[in-house]
Amino acid sequence: NNVLPERMPLLNARRCVIKVGTAVVSNPDGTLALSRMGALVEQLLGLKKQGRQVLLVSSGAVGLGRQRLGLAKDVVANTANVIDRQACAATGQGVLMSTYDMMMQRMGITCAQVLITQGDFLSRTRYTNLTETLERLAALSVVPIINENDVVTGCNQLDVQQVFSDNDKLSALVAAGADADGLALLTDVDAVFTKPPDQPGAERIK
């Protein structure tokens, strides 16, 4: 095969964390991208059939909730309207989770919702509870669907005890805590950059 040498260890990964961004699970108008989500679930099934354990970190709740509630994107993005963002997260998480559950059930996969806050990484007891729960779900062959609990955390611009600022970093923390040996970030961004790619001076890391 044509796998790069540095990626060879991924072929033998027994536990994989897959992260999907909002642009993967939703369309530009905010509606669910059902075909992409369905293809993703089929790929997760393929990994499970290979004997791998899978953990899914999925964004999309705020955007889906915003569309469902009919709120403008700039209104939700404004830190002055943090309660609106939390309302969108509460609404959208249900839409996101029910869609994953329906698709996975049809393919014989059991999934579970795991919502994480910054504080779960600051408290040893809560962190231990989190990692032990993920370990037990893996043993039960359940796919955890993980997201930040935006309903109670608000937005990262206002969080004074910030451990992670987005789901990319959250997925890396989950991979470390769950002792995963594979991490894949699925996104519409071309590569990893030195800073957000829309900012001046952002350079692609080679």
Image: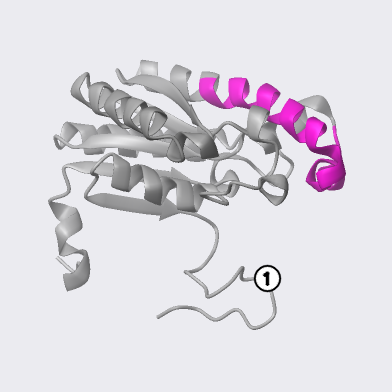
Question: What residue lies at 23% left-to-right and 38% top-to-bottom?
Answer: 47
Residue drawn at x 31%, y 28% as measured from the top left: 134
For residue 68, which quarter of the picture? top right
Q: Is residue 31 visible?
A: no
Task: Give the image quarter of residue 11.
Answer: bottom left
Display coloring: one colour
Indicate the secondary structure of the residue bearing disc 1. Answer: loop
- The C terminus: image quadrant: bottom left
Q: Is 114 inside the magenta-drawn segment?
A: no
Which residue lies under the disc numbered 1? 198
Residue 87 in magenta stretch: yes
Query: 103 or 83, which lies in front?
Result: 83
Residue 74 seen by the camera: yes
Where is residue 36? Give x, y as percent: 49, 40
In-image side of 19 versus 31 (left or right): left
Where residue 32 appears, as percent x and y from the top left, is 62, 33
Q: Position of residue 16 (x, y in %)?
A: 27, 43
- Eyeballing the image, is 191 above or below 76? below
What is the three-letter code of the residue carrying label 1? Asp
6 or 156, which lies in front? Answer: 156
Residue depicted at 15% across the width and 63% down the height: 8
Q: Residues within 10 Å of mark 1 (few under 14, many from 20)?
A: few
103 is higher (above) or lower (below) than 50: above
Q: In the image, 44: left or right of 153?
A: left
Q: Residue at x 28, y 22 (%)?
A: 137
- Helix, strand or loop for the magenta stretch, by majority: helix
Asked whether 26 or 8 is in front, the reply is 8
Work out which quarter of the rendered image holds the N terminus and state it.
Answer: bottom left
Q: Which residues are magenta?
A: 71-97
